[in-house]
Amino acid sequence: MVRLATFVVLLLAGIAVAGGLADALHGTVFVPAAPAILTVHLAWSGVTLPMGVGLAILAGYLQDLDSGGVIGLSALAYGLAFVGLHRIARRISAPGAVGRALWSGLWTLLVDVWVAVGLYVLLPWVRLAHLAERSVWQGVFWHVAATALWAPAVWLAADRIYARVGLFRRGLAVEGGGARR
Amino acid sequence: MAASWRSAKDAAIVAGLLLIPVALLVSFVRGPERLGPFDRAVRRIVVPLEAGVSYATRMVGAFFERWILQARLQEENAVLRGQVRDLERMVRRLRSLADENEELRRALQMREKAADDLLVAERVGVEQSPHFRVIGVRIDRGRGQVRPDMPVIAPDGVVGRIDRTYDDYSEVMLITDPRSRVAVELPRTRAQGILVGAGEDLCEVEVPEEFDVRAGDLVQTSGVDDIFPKGQPIGAVRSIEARPDGTKRLMVTPFVAFDRLFVMWVVLAPAPRPDPKAERPPQIPPASGLAPAR
């Protein structure tokens, strides 16, 4: 439970830092998707699929709350994308900073596209969707770039913190540790 | 068999988990007017979480805001400091111009009131004592314009007289110079005497002891020396000292502040005295307005 709380706290901290930066700089700079990086990291840390999907949904849900968008849209995107990501992570390793940045960027792009498409579909029912959908398309490039840029550092910090609290390796159901070589 | 069972179990759990965001999504898409009990329950759970996330974001945002704001404020502060320096310089210049303007205005008013033939002169240099008191003044009028012993006056009172003239400038002997002599009177008591310079910013005059002189009494030129025009203010009595020879020695503080004197007038010729034999101008009868003539 404590380890799960650590993951949530990390998620919250990542969202708050990114959101705070965006607020302070009026959204004109690279603002990374911290939950996306943590979730990609989660996939390569060898967590079981149900646990990973649950945590990914939680990350997406917190992202929805922070962005003030359609509640459940990012959560669904994160959860669905994690299923594919989990399979990829079992076959391909993500070594080095470049690999991690690449995977985080791709993941963010996938989620952003999913959210944008979802908003487009929900447009007739959701009043705020039109504006949000526009802003998603406009900011997607910077979002992906910022996430890729920040990914190695966040990944490294997460490694250190998880190692310290023993998260995933001991506390949660582990399938054998990342990619199968 | 066990692996496939576990796989099926995982798939069921994942599907169940994925239903949660779908439920959230459906709940959100429905308007508040169409909320069911489940949707209301979802919203009830969501609202505090949303508030918590918003609060955390706001707090961190405020931290970054302060951090960035501080950097911006430092830049703005440097710019404002520069502007303050420029403005202070401008204020000093304006004050100087205001003082000069006031001096010129008073000099002009004096010129319009005085009947004497006056020549304006500007201070071009000063001679100072070891205590930085002005003990001599040079003006921008030379030999061709003024002559020695011509009186020099200012709006506040008598300055002194021309001492030496050169081609382009002249030296003025102040009334505080020990060589200076000015015939003066005290208008309140009609006491008369010779005002002698007593050094830095001070003069003295001796008057007979029967005159009731008080500190603060006005001292002005009497005109009997045929140098200074009559009635020009000189200063005020500061102290009185009775002497054994039956006189009083009065210490006089000049009205003119010699260190702040920039413009003065040289009296080229005193005003002509009124001719008692001259005809009086005819009296103009007062206007009667529209009243009927009597």
Image (cartoon, coloured by chain):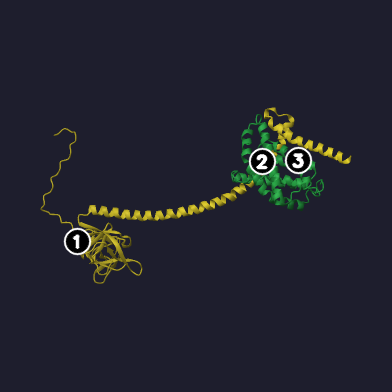
Image disc number at residue A84: 3
Q: Are marks 1 and 3 in contact (CB under 8 Å)?
A: no
The residue that label 1 is drawn on is B223
Nearer the observer, disc 2 or disc 1? 2
Q: Are marks 2 and 3 in contact (CB under 8 Å)?
A: no
Image disc number at residue A66: 2
Q: Earlier in the sequence, mark 2 or mark 3?
A: 2
For label 1, the SS is loop
Q: Nearer the viewer, residue B13 or B6?
A: B6
User: Residue B97's spot in the image, x, y percent?
Assistant: 35, 54
Instruction: Work out which quarter of the rendered image holds the N terminus of chain B and state it.
Output: top right
Q: Amino acid at mark 2?
A: Asp
For label 3, the SS is helix
Chain letter for mark 3:
A
Chain B: its colour in the image is yellow
User: Residue A26's spot in the image, x, y percent?
Assistant: 59, 44
Residue A154 visible to the viewer = no
Q: CA distance from mark 1 to mark 3?
A: 116 Å
Chain letter for mark 1:
B
Query: Relative to A100, is B147 above or below?
Result: below
Q: Residue furthest bottom?
A: B244
Q: CA distance from mark 2 to mark 1?
A: 95 Å
Query: Relative to B1, is B114 above or below?
Result: below
Chain letter for mark 2:
A
